[in-house]
Image (cartoon, coloured by chain):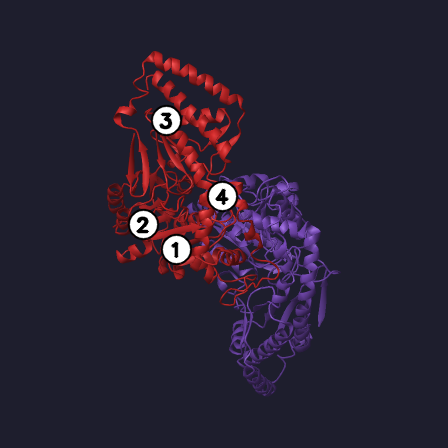
Chain colours: A red, B purple
Amino acid sequence: MIVYDYPMIQIIRQTEEEMKAYQELSKEELLSLKAELDKAYEAEKAKGLKLDMSRGKPAVSQLDMAMDFMDTLNSESSMKTEDGVDVRNYGVLEGIPEARKLLGDMMGVPADHVIVCGNGSLAIMFDTVSRSVTHGVNGCTPWCRLDKVKFLCPVPGYDRHFAITQYFGIEMVNVPMTPQGPDMDLVEKLVSEDESIKGIWCVPKYSNPQGYTYSEETVRRFAALKPAAKDFRIYWDNAYVMHHLYDDRQDELPEILSLCEEAGNPDMVFEFCSTSKVIFAGAGISAIASSKANLEEIKKSMSIMTIGYDKINQLRHVRYFKDINGIALHMKKHAEQMRHKFEAVLDVLDRELSGLGIGEWTKPNGGYFISFDAMEGCAKAIVAKCKEAGVILTGAGAAFPYGKDPKDSNIRIAPTYPALEELAMAVDLFVLCVKLVSVEKLLAGG
Amino acid sequence: MIVYDYPMIQIIRQTEEEMKAYQELSKEELLSLKAELDKAYEAEKAKGLKLDMSRGKPAVSQLDMAMDFMDTLNSESSMKTEDGVDVRNYGVLEGIPEARKLLGDMMGVPADHVIVCGNGSLAIMFDTVSRSVTHGVNGCTPWCRLDKVKFLCPVPGYDRHFAITQYFGIEMVNVPMTPQGPDMDLVEKLVSEDESIKGIWCVPKYSNPQGYTYSEETVRRFAALKPAAKDFRIYWDNAYVMHHLYDDRQDELPEILSLCEEAGNPDMVFEFCSTSKVIFAGAGISAIASSKANLEEIKKSMSIMTIGYDKINQLRHVRYFKDINGIALHMKKHAEQMRHKFEAVLDVLDRELSGLGIGEWTKPNGGYFISFDAMEGCAKAIVAKCKEAGVILTGAGAAFPYGKDPKDSNIRIAPTYPALEELAMAVDLFVLCVKLVSVEKLLAGG
């Protein structure tokens, strides 16, 4: 086994030699192995597990940890912002100043480049695409009037991004991910040649599902893109910007807005973040960051769409965390809860699958997921086998546009939600299913 | 003066004789009156008033009244719904069951016909129209692919409704309001003849800006409409459903969803409500009610748009109000604060303008506004005169599609936000401006 120590991520790969481990077994050996695995699988099934590892949800213990957030504001609290606005009444479309600063600091962006919105960033992304469809981007033709609109989709990626583009009939073009980010040669080529390409979905830090962080070179190449389409935008979903698992191994992501400005592309990025996985899932606050010109455009349509977002929850966040250091401190507590789970999964994968040539996986420094690549043509069968024995994984293929993994190989592992003991059982079952399906595949001549 | 006592609203009208009061003055009398009014106006201006009556905002005292809402949930609270769901995590797209019941009860609709959403109902209305533009209504052609889409707009009406339809390029057709609701003869005729008419904006109870409540006959005629367009929907914005000003004079509005079902039009209504003006403006919860078939369609696109709305604020509402009676009780407290302000305005209008033939106004039993009709061609000038002396009113024409009041006559008065003493000063200025502008108009041969 070789451990590639990329500057910001470790990837465990079997060597050529090891890769042949399962493949080198004779048919008889495979059959006997299968019999053994079948027996083990039946025993697992008999346990009657019932676990959901399908989504990147925080565990109850992570939520419990923030219950004092609920005391932040009470009937004795001042309900005024720093600049004297009563958060209990209408107004302040762009969010209260201190919340703009707080979420700006998360992204490394000045407050006046930030609009703070509602309880989740997915809705802002949806609205951003929807507005482009109906009204166009900064004066360009609305996408609903174009014959063809395409988005580049680094794969595997976040299923809900792809669901938005699919919903609006936008054609999705797969771009392979590497540990340094999307294949930039391909991105540069496609974006500069094809005017119908209007966007690219990015989770630049601790990517979903691999946990990769884009390298400085990647981010600089993004900032320097020369898109054929004037209304091409980078959809920079910085969902895991502060979600480190380790104190001493933290990925760093260059700030893209300023790099774009330097490169003469000030309007090319829409950046998104939220506190959904900082405080309570679905009850946080979210933000979009962009150039002032873009924000002015956004505010025009926002002023039609809403009288303003929930400013009380914005104030609650600011009073609770005080500043970015407060968030960093809170994220450390999350990390303490989460890294044992990541390590538990990685330990089992290591111990049970290393050298068998039937899987590769990532070992991220942050984020919410581990990406697992099985032998080609095995992912769906593995997920189905797990389900049959009571463990729900993210559907195979979910991390690809249209739900289609061309290799039927990728599985997203979400270790956070189950308790540690349950997780151990789930991963034991998972590796068993990987082995079983791989043996069956090899027996079938795969 | 004749007081028309409609079953649910009083309207003050001058008799024919009185109507001539100002108009019967000789030129000399008008000139001397003008001199007097000019002097009074200069005195008013010298006071240096600074008051904003432009929007229907609750007063600080109304917000203070609900501060114990902030204590409802704290770190000791159970964060689980009746059916055991942890509101701190993802999930439950349609809202927690007890919140669906609470907002359903506000509208008189069963919980399973309700989806509870975010912090304001305007966003749901926007999303509903936006979805119809990009994806169509229940399988019909998306509006962006049609040459012409029209909405009927009872006028005067709510400016933010009209802003949404204008934003999406939907042609707006004025329909006159009456104390019983929109002119139903015209609505029935247009809707049955013109397939391009896809909707009508309604504020059926304590309408914005008149405070009219649709009569039972009107609601029944709505439910029995035979629209030419399959995707015609009634946009029933029940914003003031519980906003009575008086205990003993409360308008009643028949429940339209069940009437539509009876009439064989189960899918014809999207109903909206929120607690923005019940609890804190912009920090409430909102809901859409409709047929189950419509809600299924809505949920399909909602599941792309969001992982779910803020369930913690939903739970906070339910725990605070307990049930619909809790809301009714709280609304009584609002009424106690608001009705003095309405009465203060009405008293001055009565005292100062009755019999002068230069204005008509409504005297609502609830809602947030009084609608004032000046002599034709005077509204803009009156609003400008008020502004010059420091009182901001809603822009003249704002209550009409495209901001165009064909008669330049209507002014929306929003009495709630200023304190009572300030309000008295503002209304004194207002009636003075009405008189002054009317005299000028008459002198100019208007």
Both marks 4 and 3 on one chain: no
Q: Where is residue B419 in the image (x, y as percent from the top left)?
A: 62, 71
Q: Where is residue B232 in the image (x, y as percent from the top left)?
A: 54, 46
Q: Amino acid under label 2? A: Phe
Query: Label 3 belongs to which residue?
Result: A353
Check disc 4 and report its element: helix, strand or loop.
loop
In the image, A439 versus B435, the foreground residue is: A439
Local secondary structure at mark 3: helix
Q: What residue type is labelled 1?
A: Ala
Chain hosting mark 3: A
Q: In terms of sequence position, does the residue under pointer 3 or pointer 2 come before the other?
A: 2
Where does label 2 land, which residue?
A232
Which of the 4 quarters of the picture holds residue A79?
bottom right
Residue on which disc 1 sits = A289
Vertical order, B306 against B251 (above or below): above
The x, y position of residue B398, in whole percent, is: 52, 64
Of labels 2 and 4, the one closer to you? 4
* Mark 1 Cα shell of 10 Å, populated few (<14), some (14-19), many (≥20): many
Please give the name of the residue rendered at 57% of the width and 64% of the height, measured from the top-left corner. Answer: A78
Q: Is mark 1 on a helix, strand or loop?
A: strand
